[in-house]
Image: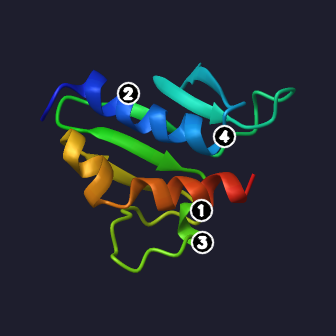
Amino acid sequence: MNNAQDIEDAVKEIVDQIAPDVRYVTKYGGEVFCADPDNDKVFVGGIFVSKAHVSLEFSEGAFFDDPAGQLEGTGKHRRHLKLRTVGDVDTKGTKALLKQAFACS
């Protein structure tokens, strides 16, 4: 895996373009994206670092348009992307998925 911080920074750069007022709140061992400035309990997703990859979680990812089948998970709502390199941020359609996440908020 590339440097996890580089992957995290690349994701946050996209988030900041899509939702410039987003707040990053430390929660569940990572950082979640809070789109509502007055509510830390509602979030659209988050970034979580493990030894093997950076997981980009989407709270309502089960309802996203994902024609390339990049999203993983089987829960009722949540889906995630496993990002192992900075290049994965582009090749796995991260920007389009983040746009969908913030459109749901």
Q: Say what secondary structure mark 4 lies in.
A: loop
Image: 22 above or below 77:
above
> Dots 3 and 1: beta carbons under 8 Å?
yes
> Dots 2 and 4: beta carbons under 8 Å?
no
Task: Between label 4 and label 3, give the one nearer the viewer.
Answer: 4
Quarter of the figure that contains the N terminus: top left
Q: Earlier in the sequence, mark 1 or mark 2?
A: 2
User: Which residue lies under the disc numbered 3?
Assistant: 63
In three-dimensional space, the C-alpha distance between marks 1 and 4, rounded to whole angstroms, equals 21 Å
Rendering coords of residue 37 (x, y %): 82, 28
User: Which residue lies under the disc numbered 2?
Assistant: 9
User: Which residue lies under the disc numbered 1?
Assistant: 77
Residue 45 visible in image:
no
> Dots 3 and 2: beta carbons under 8 Å?
no
Rendering coords of residue 48 (x, y %): 40, 32
Q: Say what secondary structure mark 3 lies in.
A: helix
User: Which residue lies under the disc numbered 4?
Assistant: 19
In three-dimensional space, the C-alpha distance between marks 1 and 2, rounded to whole angstroms, equals 25 Å
Task: Say which residue appears at 40% left-offset and 80% top-offset.
Answer: 67
Q: Say what secondary structure mark 1 lies in.
A: loop
Q: Residue furthest left?
A: 1
Task: Say which residue appears at 21% left-offset and 47% top-offset.
Answer: 87
Q: Amino acid at mark 3?
A: Phe
Task: Between label 1 and label 2, give the one nearer the viewer.
Answer: 2
> Dots 4 and 3: beta carbons under 8 Å?
no
Foreground of the two, 70 or 17: 17
Disc 4 packing (10 Å; few <14; some 14–19; many ≥20): some
In three-dimensional space, the C-alpha distance between marks 3 and 1, rounded to whole angstroms, equals 7 Å
Q: Earlier in the sequence, mark 3 or mark 2?
A: 2
Disc 1 packing (10 Å; few <14; some 14–19; many ≥20): few
Disc 3 packing (10 Å; few <14; some 14–19; many ≥20): some
Q: Amino acid at mark 1?
A: His
